[in-house]
Amino acid sequence: MIMVVRQSIVKQQQQLLKQRRRAKLKQRLTKTDANELFKGLHTAVDEKDVENAWRYIFKRYFITKDKTHTMAFTSPYQTDGFIAADEAGTLIFALRLLMEFKDGTDLTKRHDRARIMAQVVHYMHMFKKDGKNLPTVIVGADENQAFTVMASNFYKFVDRDYNWGVAPSSAWLKDPELMLDLQDDANLAVYPFKFDASSANDRYESLLDLFDAIESMTQENGSKVYKVPVSPATILGIFDEYYRIAFPRPEEVSADQAVNLFLQMLIPQGQSSDYYFMPTNRNLFHLPHDKKVPVNGRDLETFFNHYDRNLSPTEIDKLKEIADRLIEAETRRFKGDFWTPPIWSYRADELLQQAFGRDYKETSLVWDCAAGVRNLTRDFHYKDLYISTYHESEIYLGDGYNPEAQAAFQYDFLNDDVDLGAADVAEPVKWKLPKKLLIALKEASKTGKRVIFYTNPPYGTATEVKADGSAKAGISVNKMNILMKADGYGKSAQQLYAQFFVRILKIIDDFRLTNVGIGFFTKPRFFAGGDYWKDFNDRFFARFHLVYGNMFTSNEFSDTAGNWPVTFSVYALNDSQKDKTDSSDMQVTLSVEETALKNSTDKKVVIKQIAIHQMRCIYKPKALSNWARASIQDAPEMTAPYPQLSSAMSVSKGQSPRGRLVVGSLGYMVSNSNNVGEGINNGGVWIVTGSAYKANGFNVMPSNFDRAVVNFAARRSPDATWVNDQDNYLYPNTKGSLYLEFVNDALIYSLFDNASYQAAYRDSRWSNTTVPGRWANQWFWLSKDKVIEAADAYSLAEVYQDTRGDTDRFVSRKIQKVKDELSPEALNVLNAATQVWYDTLPYREAMNEDEPSLYLTAWDAGWFQVKKVNDKYPSKHYREFRDAFKKLKAKTATATYDLGMLLH
């Protein structure tokens, strides 16, 4: 008992010392200092810039702010930096820090760490040869990572017979024996501190960890093996390195088993007796259920011995919180499973309280049906809680959280019990659901007790099944996917979170539940409609209505790619027909929120509302993309060959082009989907003079030209943000002068936007005129006479000859008709672009000799081609054009909202 008390006191003392050390670090390394470093690293263009940024922060920390010791910063032997006590000083100080900085390395790779250490070992050889004291601490860093090691662990290399005659900077290339020895050395099995996190605070904390490591090594004076600290900022990288070295046959170990093993070894306090190396074979590791997996035992033990695993309960909690970020990381990202940060779990609880009462945790049956390691519920207490998760190992990882839960069980929500129905409820033996939950659901049916399904379901896409309901060859499909396809849910059946919603509808019907709530984190795309979601929305919102919902960026979640909206929304089962929502008229209001500091003095992070955003369901025929196509007249496909393009000058190769060009076409407009983000961020809207290899578009014809340019300008001109990313477009209000002005503005906009790839071709393969090899650019804005006049003035013989026998283009004729009606903004763009065209004319024929594939002698060469000339021979009027176009873009963006195509 006395020993236990002593151990507890020692641990408390260690934690107190750690806290004091951290506070001292923050005094000498402020966030302002850190931001200066990261700014320099972010803007670095070469290795010298990286070196200067790091030299700044080390000088700041050790020279400028260290008032205790007299330190000197030098560069002996042309090292990147060496910090040591001033030889004139009398204080004995352990720090002798040697630094080496690189650009473009990946310090998670042992080879790149060895590359730096090979250079450092050569430097240390020079130190020893000249009788100087060797460094005690080594730091290697690049533009977003750094590692530190005890120099004494590498002294052994200094006296060996290596290729000492080469320059240290080339040692990694010219001293292969040293490189091999370094890569095999266990002392390099350390994971770097990373500074590329999305959160500035995470970067700052990692930087503090780096300097904390250096300080700790200094205190050891090089006499002991230093233990690298473990923190949430470094655990992902540590796991990656562990996974690389742990298993000789990784295909035999599921990722959730690997994570369990990792955490059991990383957190020896309270380690389960089910996890251990087999006594007779250290290359076998025992897991629960008597599972034994092959491991590289010696490498594993060496690896974990590098890390300080003396963790406080709070630190252990933080590491466990992100355990499901580690499980099958790549697969789970593909599926769309994301870890829910605690601050958003608290916000979700607030919305559930608003919807169902402050006492909902006491009065409702709550089922988290995709619980992971219980990030949503772990900080709260529930009277009637059920927890299920797909991965069995997550049950063990979450052990200790929500001990009040009635049951915590492995359950595949989209497969298990899906084949059962209302007739099977009376036979518990058929169900995989725990008997306790079965009884509770049946009781809720009788009493009207509220059942709340509360979870963060996966956001990914399931494999689409064939028309007959079978899966594609070699691909497994879950049962909910098959059920939804058979039941007429259309393409929404592919979405995993839609499957969770429909599974709940099935449970409601199977158990005849009458009082049900749902609290889900999902993408909000279905709020914007689209025919993809129509069948789902019609059915779901006939039975449920939205009570409250917010919206925040996916960057608030960890390990998500991109920047798209997430909503936590609360839904309630309709009491009667009066609550039924017609999804074709549905409009929802969401609170737009973000995490931020409470104020400048209080560093607490809180959630703040930054806007209110409305989303509305839009389906055919009201969708803008459908309206733009509606007036196209039937025409046969061109029989002669035509260009299939992925941009103005890129012909599709090795693909199967799906775009089809018809007789009389002015070109092809790709118009993928009908939402803001697809048109602006994802390259889903563009124009080519030929055909496009993508089929998600339409031929631009004289009959639909006005609608086509309206579609293009509306899809391209608004600013796309994560808030409006998934908003769908409604067709415009076509009555009144505002629309007529927008049509003309859109015409000019469509000629000069960066996604307007209209060009002329002079290629023997194609012709859309009576002249073989001439592909006319019907989007050219100047008359043939104007071109002839200019070609004559600049003596452009080839351009002049190309006009013979030709006629004005469609857009040129169109502009002549409406020129007097053009707005000042449109006219300024047109005039400035024409000036750029004039300025680049003298260089056309010369540049054509160097780049004939640009077809610059074509008299109707389009804006894309003009810009190519301008790139090499800049026009003095191009800035004027750019400023004018910026104003026109802002105007068309505003009109897109004013005409009702998007909601303000």
Image (cartoon, grey):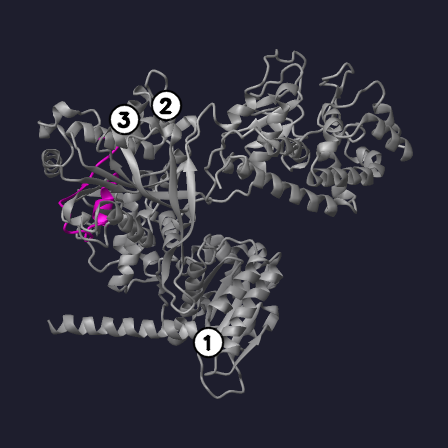
* Residue drawn at x 47%, y 58% as measured from the top left: 195
Q: Name the residue under label 3.
A: 479
Could you say which is closer to the camera, residue 287 or residue 664?
A: 664
Expressed as whole percent of the image width and height from the top left, the position of residue 109 reads: 46, 52
Mark 3 crowdedness (10 Å alpha carbons): few <14, some 14-19, many ≥20: some
Q: How much space separates mark 2 and mark 3, taking CA atoms?
A: 15 Å
Residue 587 picture location, percent across and down = 39, 36
Residue most extreme to the front: 736
Q: Based on the displayed image, in which of its 4 quarters is residue 800 positioned? A: top right
Residue 217 percent across, percent down from the top left: 40, 71
Q: What residue type is labelled 2?
A: Gly
Mark nearest the camera among 1 and 3 is 3
Name the secondary structure under disc 3: helix
- Specify the label residue 490 is tagged with: 2
The answer to whether the residues at label 2 and label 3 have Cβ atoms under 8 Å apart is no
Magenta stretch: includes residue 416: yes
Describe the element under mark 1 as helix, strand or loop: loop
What's the distance in space between the residues labelled 2 and 1, CA to CA? 67 Å
The three-letter code of the residue at mark 1 reads: Leu
State whether residue 477 is above or below residue 104: above
Q: Residue 95 carries which label?
A: 1
Q: Position of residue 850 (x, y in %)?
A: 79, 35
Badge 1, how many Cα within 10 Å: few under 14, some, many 20+? many
Q: Which of marks 1 and 3 is nearer the N terminus?
A: 1
Closer to the eye: label 2 or 1: 2
**Which sits earlier in the primary sequence, circle 2 or circle 3?**
3
In this rendered view, identify the residue nearer to me: 89 or 335: 335
Tell me which numbered mark, 2 or 1, is placed earlier along the sequence: 1
Residue 215 magenta-highlighted: no
Which residue is nearer to you in this view: 895 or 540? 895
Magenta residues (range): 389-417
